[in-house]
Image (tube, rainbow, N blue to C red):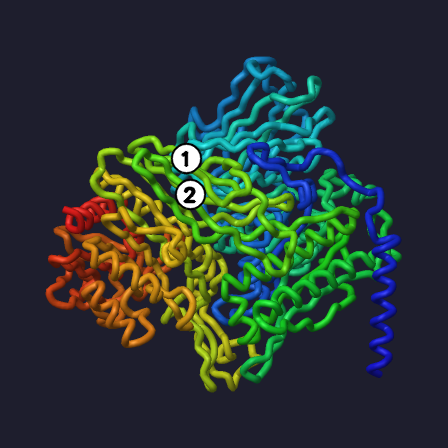
Amino acid sequence: MRHIIIIIGIVLATLSSKAQGQKGLWANIDYDGEPWVKNVSLPYKISKGLYNRHIALWASHGRYYDAKKGKWKWQRPNLFCTNEDLFTQTIVVPYLMPMLENAGAVVFTPRERDWQTNEVIVDNDRQNSPTEYIEAEAKGHWETANTRGFACHDGIYHDNENPFEAGTARMSKTTRSSKRYNIISYQPSFPEEGRYAVYVSYQTVKKSIDDAIYTVWHKGQQTTFKVNQRMGGGTWVYLGTFDFDKGSDEFNRVVLTSQSKHRKGVVTADAVRFGGGMGNIERGGNTSGMPRCLEGARYYAQWAGMPYDVYSPKQGLDDYSDDINVRSHMTNLLGGGSPYMPSRNGRNVPIELSLAVHSDAGYRNDDTSLIGSMGICTTQFNDGRLNAGISRLVSRDFAQTLLDNLSRDLGQKYGAWPIRELRNQNYSETRLPEVPSAIIETLSHQNFNDMCLGLDPEFRFCMARSIYKSILKYVNKMHGKDYTVSPLTPDNFSISLDNDGKATLSWTPVEDNLEPTAKPTEYVVYTATGTADFDNGTVTGQQPEYSIRLEPGVLYSFRVAALNKGGKSFPTQVLCAMYNPYSRHKIMIVDGFDRTSSPAVVNRPLGKGFDMEEDPGVTLGKTAGWCGPQISFNTKNAGGEGPGALGYSSSELEGKIVAGNDRNYVRTHASAISYAGNYSIVSCSAKALEKGIATLSDISLVDIVAGLQRSLDGKTFRTFTPEIANIMKYFTQKGGSLLVTGAYITSDSQTEQERQAIRELLHCDFGGSYQGKSSMLKGLSTEFSFHHELNASHYAATSPDILSPVIPAFATLAYNDGQSAAVAYQGNDYRTISSAVPFECIVDHQKRMSIMRGFIDFLLK
């Protein structure tokens, strides 16, 4: 039997190879028009990535209504602090989607992608204030289009209620003039400062243009897009996600103009939406009560204007089936009429690939075994052909490419990564799409060893990068083109400042040992001043260095990304600099908080899982991936799904967005220091300081941002490495002052020798962990609160150290129960302040400002 299986496998591989080499390529089928959405503010071009490639991508499942049981529910059980409905998003949303977009792709997803619970809609059919929606005319007029448009109402939406057929859209003739043109201003009133996805909408009509110009104003910066209105009308079209200020002003809005290269075209305008919002689709008398991003695709499709037969062919009787099918139906409707779906009526978006990202069940009873990944495709449907006439065997090639790369990429970093199988069967998400498609079952959400990796943000990055590379290679191979893999994020970022105000930014490239093409050829430096958002970047060339002369008294913030022909890396952390020509002191801020991690791992013979009470972990930015703390750790009950099963978890965090490491805390410190007095400011990563790239030769005060830095494995993410401890020891011996704030600055020492070194440096000792419920602190003649519980706006210090002063040091801040939270040392040799409450965790802005002033007055005056 084994020999028969091998022979069948060889035959299938041969068929697949022949399909790819002879029939499987798109050959002369391609799209060469304008992209659906194009960011024209980018200072670089992508020639060997995924520019102008349109990809449908989604994370599996989501909250849905079970009509038979009369309740909303998840499609998969709560295990290991999450469930499949929540977990797969944590790979797709923060990692895979941005990677594809950084490579130039336009990504469509049939689920809400924005982890923002607020939603603000500005529309011509509903004006809440005189400044919210404004039409201005300089050439011609705005008039009502002869098609239906969007209009919304308060409250819930019922089955078969389409908001995109409830209102009107506006329309104007286009002009080539750069001086006289019409505009529409969409100026929302944001309930909170934060990051919001921006979606525009319009109607596709006979003379629609392919270059409608939208400008997003975000905290004073401008980013301009061209949207191809000849496709994708009558739905939400994603532009990007941006930082906006609270309230309403002209520096936080979207502006559409009537400008175009087409003299006789028309531009149409409909609602603009900011933020993902909460679910508003009623089923069984109630909404889900969840953020829209956690609901199934069926409900987003209704909010996005899809016809009833697209999102509910079961006539409202079976939401589970409708949710599975709508992902493909929506993809086909949007893609119909494009070169990749020429025989289907639709909205002309040239979607050429579809991928569903899932996790699967399955478990092992031993201590080390992994379940691994499985790929799924469907080749036996529609006579083995896709809509454009090419063989469905190309989907098998795609699924195989995904598995091969996961095996190689994850195996290189984490040891052998199991590949379960390539399953060629009848699954909705691979049968219905009329373009090449696959399902990737990433790992087992039921197996402890899989989830030890799956809950680690670094692993999720690596898995997403492998999937991105598979898509990159597959798409370009289908078109017979070369590709370049985008580079990795630069490292060892630092900023120095000379006496004349010239700041020099430096960094080092990071090599990708798996991809010889992933070398950076250029870099882009992003700059922000004051409280404004970052600009769209300046390309700096091949050298990992950039100099800029700073305006005196202005706080500058920078971050850097690597570039090549394949796209852009993720950016570095934010560093800051400020030049004050009359300052007597220069302050160095050291970013020592680069940790991301899973919750604390429990791995004992009779107990396995994740203890969120001990440590809830740290994600990169926000996450919507937690259901609640794990309750059951009994290994004897492995393989179950309900109460008592290994991994069974509570539901207290369902629907909660939880903040993680934004890598932007140097800016918080620098802003407070700039308020505290006339100081010059530089900054660096802790790694740059360790390696001698950054030096302290002219520094009076070092401010170490330790955040939630902590080494749960004794190796990675250490608060004080031996190198940093020695540098600080030498610095203070020379009379330098030291400010250290971080939740685990004393408890993270790995040996008694290290504990003694920290005791001597900071003049405080570990006195236990603060487990109180109160978030109040007292001291410095005031009281204030800190982020102590998991929340959406800022990471939380849930169990910070209690710091015991070592005489002659003394306590300066106390928790609500009177135990010491911060310690000061005023010696003849040097001064220090150590706080177990990270400075950036102080909730109130004005309190932060005054506390930093008090810290610096003590340390430098």
The one of 329 and 198 positioned closer to us in this rendering = 198
Badge number at residue 548: 1
Residue 733, given in percent of the width and then of the height, sits at: 20, 59
Amino acid type shown at disc 1: Ile
> Which residue: 50% across, 71% down?
80
Residue shown at the point (57%, 44%) measured from the top left: 563
Please identify the quarter of the rendering in which residue 747 is found: bottom left
196 lies left or right of 68: left
Q: Which residue is depicted at the point 44% across and 61% down?
A: 596
Assess disc 2: are there few (<14), some (14-19) or many (≥20) residues with their C-alpha within 10 Å of its C-alpha: many
Q: How many marks?
A: 2
Q: Residue at x 67, y 46 (%)?
A: 49
Q: Quadrant of the N terminus?
A: bottom right
Q: Nearer the viewer, residue 335 or 601?
A: 601
Considering depth in this image, is 254 or 511 the residue closer to the camera?
Answer: 511
Pointer 1 local density, CA inside 10 Å: few below 14, some 14–19, many at least 20: few
Q: Position of residue 423 (x, y in %)?
A: 75, 68
Kindly state the secondary structure of the residue where label 1 is placed: strand
Determine whether label 1 and label 2 are within 8 Å by CB: yes
- Work out whether residue 307 can be spotted: no
Look at mark 2 in the image and give the residue it sits on: 505
Q: Is residue 516 left or right of residue 654?
A: right
Which is more N-terminal, label 2 or label 1?
2
**Element at badge 2?**
strand
